[in-house]
Amino acid sequence: MTIAIEVRQLRKHFGSVRALGGIDLDIRKGEFFALLGPNGAGKTTLINIIAGLALADSGSVRVMGYDVRSDYREARRTLGVVPQELVFDPFFTVRETLTIQSGYYGLKNNAGWIEEIIHNLDLDDKADANMRSLSGGMKRRVLVAQALVHKPPVIVLDEPTAGVDVELRQGLWRFIKQLNGNGHTIVLTTHYLDEAEALCSRVAMLKQGNIVALDSIKNLTNTLSGCMVRLRLTPDILPAPLQPLADNHEDGCHFLALEDYAQLENVLAALRAARTQVVEMQVLQPDLEEVFMKIMNTNQALEPPATAR
């Protein structure tokens, strides 16, 4: 198994504030990996250290085998980072910006790849527009293009779809999934947990500078027992025996929290006994958002299995 990013005992403080408390993490080559956590959990600090934008107090990071401090030139060549902030030079067009970015990496005759990036990110009609004239969503597309211009094997996306429209989001993910299919390692941070669940194979959850969960999405969601049942009833009255199971009542639907699937027959029996008709029923499976909320609201970390790395 080839490791794309190797993090060992990484620690970082900003004054008295501990940003990272001894992170150990392996991200495999070709993986689509998510870093999740609330604001202030340490995600951006970790990314900045990986990218060489910040120095750790202790510990080590390697990208494609290159130490980010002692082999920083090679480490940075293997990495493309899309930052959260909209940082751009207002004096150049989109195409000029990408050509200059190519020059930073010593790339000549890169026009063909630049045009391919421009096309795949739907920037064709903005290629000769000045950067300062672009909308926020278009500027974010250019940031993605800049991160890809030197064809890095590892791509880090730090909240890439924050504040952008649905069309851009879908187009961006089509292109990123294509890159991942071609062997690129993708590391994603996002507050859209549905994106992480749909795209990523494994997830690390950070809380207060520590990894509190690390596993595949399937294994993480399997840690939650039971299910949620959504019912639309006629009449819209929940029988008394089922009221202890009630979790919510929204848009004319009752939500019941069941400890296991065996309880479902008891629910139906209670409805039949009360002569209550089921107009609509849906069994909702536990998802990544539920796992995330459970972990963030508890003091106990989920121990990753030995195979999690």
Image (cartoon, rainbow, N blue to C red):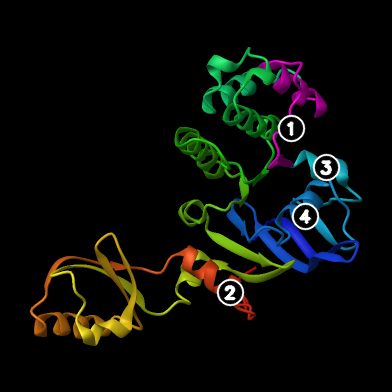
Q: What element carries label 4?
A: helix
Residue 92 against residue 137 in the figure, above or below: above
Q: Tell me how far mark 3 sits from mark 1, CA to CA.
A: 24 Å
Tell me which amino acid carries mark 2: Asn
Span highlighted in magenta in the image: 79-107
Q: Quickly name the residue at label 2.
A: 297
Q: Which mark is residue 280?
A: none
In the figure, residue 228 lies in which quadrant? bottom left
Tell me which amino acid carries mark 3: Glu
Tell me which amino acid carries mark 4: Thr
Tell me which amino acid carries mark 1: Val
Q: Where is residue 65 in the image (x, y as percent from the top left)?
A: 78, 53
Kindly report which numbered mark, 2 or 4, lies closer to the viewer in this rendering. 2
The residue carrying pointer 4 sits among few (fewer than 14), some (14 to 19) or many (20 or more) residues within 10 Å by Cα, namely many
Q: Residue 74 carries which label?
A: 3
Q: Is residue 78 magenta?
A: no
Q: Position of residue 89 (x, y in %)?
A: 76, 23
The residue carrying pointer 2 sits among few (fewer than 14), some (14 to 19) or many (20 or more) residues within 10 Å by Cα, namely few
Q: Position of residue 284 (x, y in %)?
A: 33, 67
Q: Quickly name the residue at label 1.
A: 87
Q: Quickly name the residue at label 4.
A: 45
The residue shown at (60%, 19%) is 115
Residue 188 against residue 176 in the figure, above or below: below
Kindly report which numbered mark, 3 or 2, lies closer to the viewer in this rendering. 2
Q: Tell me how far mark 4 sits from mark 1, CA to CA.
A: 18 Å
Kindly report which numbered mark, 3 or 1, lies closer to the viewer in this rendering. 1
Q: Tell me how far mark 2 sits from mark 4, CA to CA.
A: 22 Å
Q: Is residue 103 magenta?
A: yes
Q: Is mark 2 on a helix, strand or loop?
A: loop
Q: What element carries label 3?
A: helix
In the figure, residue 59 lies in which quadrant? bottom right
